[in-house]
Image (spheres, helix red, strand yellow):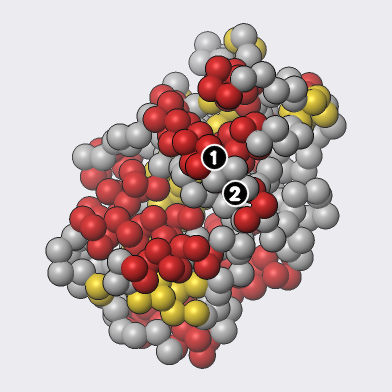
Amino acid sequence: MHVVVTGGCGFVGSALARRLVEWLPAIRVTAFDNLRRAGAETNRSLLRSLGIAVVHGDARCRSDVDALPACDWLIDAAAEPSVLAGTTAAGGGGTTSRQLVEHNLWGTVNLLEAAAERRSGFVMLSTSRVYAIEPLARLPLAESGSVFRLDTASPLPIGVGPAGISEAFATAGPVSLYGATKLASEALAIEYAAQARTPLFINRCGVMAGAGQFGRADQGIFSWWIHAWAARRPLRYIGFGGRGLQVRDCLHPDDLARLIMTQLSTTATGPQPLVNVSGGLASATSLAELSAWCADRFGPHEVAADPAPRPNDIPWLVLDHGRASQAYAWQPDRDRLTIFEEIAAHAEDHPDWLDRVAN
């Protein structure tokens, strides 16, 4: 089996490439990456040391995609991953709206066309941010100590339950420019796979987290927060009263890799039901809770309060991964404390990490 991983030198893509060659016999993996992110060169060296071919190319350039070798599966882990991308907000990464669309939509179209022409299966990594902002912002929440919790005693909209946000939740815009590019990519992927009768899996991922992540304040928040705390960098609670009560779940890439490994063994054709893939409620953590953990691990550090809201931010987003668990007999193995400790150990071993991965 030959698998091409786009975004293969990024945090998630490189982790998937490594795990596939470690866990699956007789597999060949090619990583495809434009090496735009600082830190990608480090991953390129690591992948090559494992015998993984690394191709420098850009999914936005059809000739680069056409030059890729034939493969059985294409895993699309390439994207501008920030919900602030394409906005003028601080933390937007300097990405224009046009660049965002070119990366996350037109690049995906090039990959979908190549997969259809080569009869390759396709695994798309999508995002929790395809879910509609306004209904998410209106969820009934209650304060419980240092965290927002879903008020399950109140009426809940369709697609929300005690375990979190399911695949049935609203996706009508606005979902952010970032979310819109991923949602449009999902729709196009379904059409390409249905027409070509090639297998397609769409995985809507929660917040990815683990050692070696290129964390920033607008993406990879768990990794960035722990590294910044260890390095005594300035930290702020942004919005929602400036108290850090906002909540996300976190998922380790190794748990995502286990699920994808199962998907690659399919004999099905055409689009398969899309699924949420997340750490779920058991991994849900507020920034204030994460700060308390960091204080115990590294010692105290001041966090400033910035009550002003930021575009596209929401107070609570935890994905219900029940459909993935039922379909694939899958559960995340890495709990949040294990993930936090892995990141903390990496921060101690690489005290200059935030400088090394800053563009």
From where the camera sits, is residue 316 visible?
A: no
Residue indicated by mark 2: 353
For numbered disc 1, what is the local secondary structure? helix
Name the one closer to the observer, 175 or 284. Answer: 284
Q: Is residue 259 above or below residue 315?
A: below
Q: Is residue 200 above or below residue 315?
A: below
Name the one closer to the observer, 309 or 191. Answer: 309
269 vs 162, left or right, is left
Q: Residues within 10 Å of mark 1 (few under 14, many from 20)?
A: many
**Residue at point 49%, 27% (across, down):** 284
Q: Which mark is residue 347?
A: 1
Query: Can you say which quadrant of the picture contains the N terminus?
Result: bottom left
For marks 2 and 1 on the same chain, the one whose residue lies earlier in the sequence: 1
**Residue at point 29%, 72% (across, down):** 51
**Percent from the top left, x then y, of residue 25?**
15, 63
**Residue at point 47%, 83% (across, down):** 65
**Residue at point 39%, 30% (across, down):** 338
From where the camera sits, is residue 79 visible?
A: yes
- Under mark 2, the amino acid is Trp
For numbered disc 2, what is the local secondary structure? helix
Image quadrant in which you'd find residue 347: top right
